Image (cartoon, helix red, strand yellow):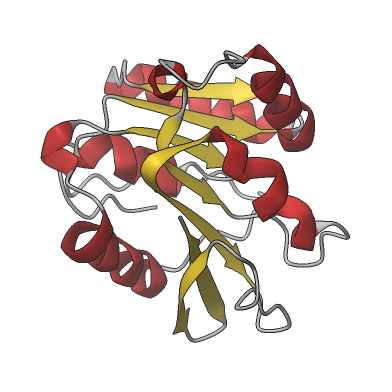
Amino acid sequence: MRIIRGKYKGRHIPTPTGFKARPTTDFAKEGLFNILENVYVDFDEAPTALDLFAGTGSIGLELASRGCSKVVSVEKDFKHWQFLSRVQKELQAKEWLPQKGDVFKYVRAYRERLPKEESGADAALFDIIFADPPYALENLKDIPDETLPLLADGGIFILEHGKDYDFSTHPRFIDHRNYGSVNFSFFR
């Protein structure tokens, strides 16, 4: 795993052998962050981010490296979470918060804790949400509707998925990008 830009730029962090995660390719990650920086996100404003199905932590760590004030990375697999926690400690990345847990349970619990009133609710919402579920996940199509309530006004939600999914008819869909076998759908 390589950090492309920001304060952790150039760091190569070897992932343990036998990892079950399918990390986002460097080619796709570079394309994604070029789009984020040039179109959707001003990292100088220290946005907050939620990284779902964190896997190796590559996206969450890149978000932290580029200037996010807080990045919560949620990962269910215990060995992956242990790896994320070890890397977080080694880098002393206090803005990066690996959490062990089921993504759907985490999102539902977080939604329940949000203020019921509209005013002041943005303080608890995320400016950037990234989800990289297993491509064969049975309820992958439900992720936007489950997750979008956690997105701040003006925020961006990115869903990585395989070629078999098309979210272009979703009411909050705004863009789609393809990098080989990696597809990103963007929502506002």
Q: Quadrant of the C terminus?
A: bottom left
Q: Is residue 33 above or below residue 146?
A: below
In the picture, measured across the screen, residue 83 lies left or right of residue 4, that is right
Q: Is residue 36 above or below residue 117?
A: below
Residue drawn at (52%, 69%) of the image: 185
Residue drawn at (63%, 35%) of the image: 80
Question: How many numbered markers are drawn?
Answer: 0
In the picture, measured across the screen, residue 159 lies left or right of residue 5, that is right
Residue 42: % across, % down: 17, 46
Residue drawn at (47%, 83%) of the image: 178
- Is 58 or 33 nearer to us in this picture? 33
- Is residue 181 among the parts visible in the rendering? yes
Res. 39 image quadrant: bottom left
Residue 136: % across, % down: 81, 66
Res. 68 image quadrant: top left
Residue drawn at (65%, 54%) of the image: 144
Q: Is residue 125 above or below residue 144?
A: above
- Is 121 or 75 nearer to us in this picture? 121
- Is residue 20 among the parts visible in the rendering? no
Residue 172: % across, % down: 55, 61
Res. 182 image quadrant: bottom right
Q: Is residue 41 above or below residue 61?
A: below
Residue 158: % across, % down: 49, 57
In the picture, measured across the screen, residue 145 lies left or right of residue 36, that is right
In the picture, measured across the screen, residue 166 lies left or right of residue 16, that is right
